[in-house]
Image (cartoon, rainbow, N blue to C red):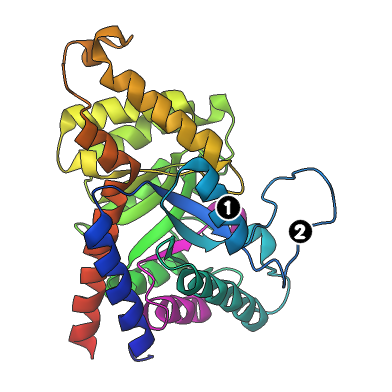
């Protein structure tokens, strides 16, 4: 078991101070995938293709054009090879995680770095080792797994073993959670939420992902209701239909704390465009704030339901507060183990 490294403490301290100073005015994209394009360059084609690798520099340019202050970044699984042995796959994934840490160091004040591990491609012991490095060497607050793309059940014994260790480290286990595969059913998220209560877990896409409209319909409703029963679930709005984003916003805002603190905006860049997604978020909130003309009677009957402060929390404040809380969990957990 590796010791907590001073570099992680420095990174956590730096980001903690930054977020405390700026939490009230940050626009945060909570779901962005970054790649070292010098190591894994994009294909030499003129047109965009799904998940095209983008570098830290590319992301900063896109953030500037979209009016985004800060992005939560993790590696792009489509750009990281997993075609070797478990040890070779683990080294490739560690290299991808190291690039995330490098980007956060190089572009200070623009990125929150987060980790990624994979119990199938890397094996459980390697996946746990990667999680420990992500938290104790790099100071990452979130460590993600992708059961859909890597094809393993979200609540399998292997995933639970890795997620248990992430929780022990104080970090937030995070998952691709969508209706785009049979590997991330609502029952699995329910199982994990119960297992780790009250420790937070992150479900990226809130049931969307690459699912069809029809395929996602039931999961959108079930995911929304599950989050109202298990307040330790955090959802990132990325790769999810705008209509269901608005429905979740209205429902959780009416429900109030703590539920209204558990929703974060994201683009899934480069799978989604930052400018398009955050332009949509801004337009949606303008509509919700103008309650007298909104089509939903729940909004019209509640003047001031979406005030300026509430909008800012959804656009960035919620995620900033969540990361600050997770850093405190990490410092507490690793202080106990030291």
Looking at the image, residue 298 sits to the left or right of residue 79; the answer is left
Quarter of the image with the C terminus is bottom left
Quarter of the image with the N terminus is bottom left
Counting from the top left corner in percent of width and height, residue 242 is at 46, 27
* Residue 141 colored in magenta in the image: yes
Residue occupying the point 23% across, 49% down: 24
Disc 1 + disc 2, Cβ < 8 Å: no
Label total for image: 2
Most foreground residue, 311 or 257: 311
Quadrant position of residue 85:
bottom right
Looking at the image, residue 2 sits to the left or right of residue 181; the answer is left
Label 2 sits on residue: 42
Residue occupying the point 24% across, 16% down: 299
* Residue 280 colored in magenta in the image: no
Which residue range is magenta in the image? 124-150
Would you say residue 76 is visible in this rendering?
no
Between label 1 and label 2, give the one nearer the viewer: 1
Would you say residue 331 is visible in this rendering?
yes
Q: Residues within 10 Å of mark 2 (few under 14, many from 20)?
A: some
Label 1 sits on residue: 61
Q: Earlier in the sequence, mark 1 or mark 2?
A: 2
């Amino acid at each position: 078991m590796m010791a907590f490294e001073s570099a992680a403490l420095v990174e956590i301290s730096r980001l903690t101070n930054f977020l405390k100073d700026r939490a009230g005015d940050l626009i945060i994209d909570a779901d962005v995938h970054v790649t070292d394009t010098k190591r894994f360059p994009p294909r030499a084609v003129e047109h965009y293709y799904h998940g095209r690798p983008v570098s830290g520099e590319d992301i900063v340019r896109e953030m500037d054009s979209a009016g985004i202050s800060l992005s939560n970044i993790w590696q792009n699984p489509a750009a990281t090879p997993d075609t070797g042995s478990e040890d070779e796959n683990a080294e490739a994934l560690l290299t991808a995680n190291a690039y995330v840490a490098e980007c956060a160091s190089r572009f200070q004040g623009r990125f929150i770095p987060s980790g990624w591990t994979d119990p199938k491609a890397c094996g459980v012991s390697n996946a746990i080792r990667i999680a420990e490095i992500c938290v104790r060497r790099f100071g990452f607050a979130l460590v993600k797994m992708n059961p859909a793309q890597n094809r393993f059940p979200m609540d399998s014994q292997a995933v639970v073993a890795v997620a248990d260790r992430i929780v022990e480290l104080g970090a937030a286990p995070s998952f691709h959670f969508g209706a785009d595969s049979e590997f991330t059913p609502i029952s699995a998220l329910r199982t994990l939420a119960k297992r780790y209560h009250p420790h937070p877990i992150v479900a990226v896409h809130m049931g969307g992902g690459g699912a069809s409209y029809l395929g996602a319909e039931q999961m959108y409703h079930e995911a929304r209701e599950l989050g109202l029963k298990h307040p330790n679930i955090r959802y990132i709005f990325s790769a999810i239909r705008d209509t269901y984003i608005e429905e979740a916003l209205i429902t959780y805002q009416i429900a109030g704390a703590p539920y209204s603190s558990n929703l974060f905006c994201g683009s899934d860049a480069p799978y989604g465009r930052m400018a398009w997604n955050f332009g949509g978020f801004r337009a949606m909130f303008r509509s919700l704030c103008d309650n007298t003309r909104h089509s939903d009677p729940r909004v019209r009957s509640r003047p001031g339901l979406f005030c300026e402060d509430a909008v800012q929390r959804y656009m960035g404040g919620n995620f900033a507060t969540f990361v600050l809380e997770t850093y405190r969990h990490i410092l507490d957990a690793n202080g106990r183990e030291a």
